[in-house]
Image (tube, rainbow, N blue to C red):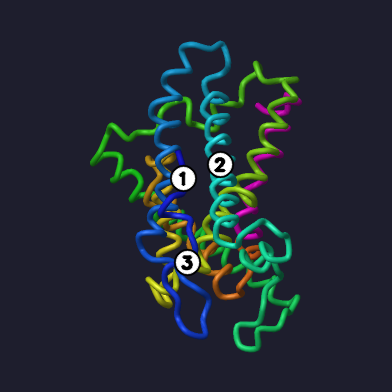
Amino acid sequence: MDITRGISSRPQVTNPGQTPQYSLRKILGIWASVTLPMALLTFVATPFLIPRTSLHSGLVFWTLMVLGMVWQFVVSLVVLHRELGGLHWPTVKARVRLNGPLDPRSGQPRKVLWWWAMPAIGANILGGYLAITLDAAWVRWLPALAEPAHAQIQGLATPALQGQWWVLGLALVSSVFNYVLGEELLFRGVLLPRMTGVFGRADWVANTVLFGLYHVHKIWFLPSMIASSFGYAWAAKRYRSMWMGVVVHGIESYFVVLVLAVILGWYP
């Protein structure tokens, strides 16, 4: 069965003198191909496996989410292979904009532009903070979407994980596929450069909304998930660099230090 039929063929919309663009159908098709598996892993696989294994429920959930992000990497490779006729590094690198930030006017690389990651990070933090009340209202409106215990990261701060070094490996793999090879590669590398044909100058806004809606595995935080994600797409779009999105998103990887503290027993 070819899951990419109709969603990962060559770009369907082309603007003269511009980068070939995707149609809305193709954008939504690629989005659905990574969002639906996350929904199945969250609402079907997780509750099925938790009572059937001795593994900590939070680790069951986390492991399945990592598998979902690995799937995003697979989808990205399939889409790029079909689109580019192969996975040749120079071509892939140029296609997903794996370059440093470029000056919006001259198109020339400038190292000083990396500093623009800071206001993007600040905007995400502010957006997330302001949307906290919306999260509460969202869950009150739909109480069935309240965060389950196994999804609460603080639940992993338990003596049972002390000395469990494999959990650090899980955290590192999670970081790689969350901030580089999974979410960023698919949303800012594959999709964002091909969304202008449908959404115009608001392509980075649409990219952020799709990115937020993809987080069905954190649906209880949906409002703040969207509000705290605009900096990723804005930085990647304005400076035509997937790495800018990686830097802004990757600030969250501090959680690896927290995991290490739990493994070493350094917590209250």
Q: Closer to the N terminus: mark 1 or mark 3?
A: 3
Under circle 2, the secondary element is helix
Q: Label 1, label 3: how many angstroms apart (C-alpha)?
A: 19 Å
Residue 257 in the image: above or below residue 233: above
Residue 228 placement (x, y as % from top left): 48, 56
Q: Which residue lies furthest to the left in this view?
A: 141
Q: Assign the magenta stretch its main secondary structure.
A: helix
Residue 217 placement (x, y as % from top left): 44, 38
Contact (Cβ within 8 Å) of mark 3 with mark 2 = no
Contact (Cβ within 8 Å) of mark 1 with mark 3 = no
Residue at coordinates 54% horizontally, 47% vertically from top-left?
Answer: 75
| Residue 254 on the magenta span | yes
- 109 left or right of 122 in image: right
Residue at coordinates 43% horizontally, 40% vertically from top-left?
Answer: 218
Q: Closer to the N terminus: mark 1 or mark 2?
A: 1
Magenta residues, start to end = 246-268
Q: Which mark is residue 69?
A: 2
Q: Which residue in the protein does label 3 denote?
A: 11
- 129 left or right of 177 in image: left
The C terminus: image quadrant:
top right
Q: Which amino acid does label 1 sit on?
A: Val
Q: Which residue in the protein does label 1 denote?
A: 34
* Location of residue 247 (image quadrant): bottom right
Residue 81 placement (x, y as % from top left): 60, 55
Q: Crowding near pointer 1: few (<14 within 10 Å), some, many (20+)?
A: many
Q: Which residue lies furthest to the bottom in this view?
A: 106
Contact (Cβ within 8 Å) of mark 1 with mark 2 = no
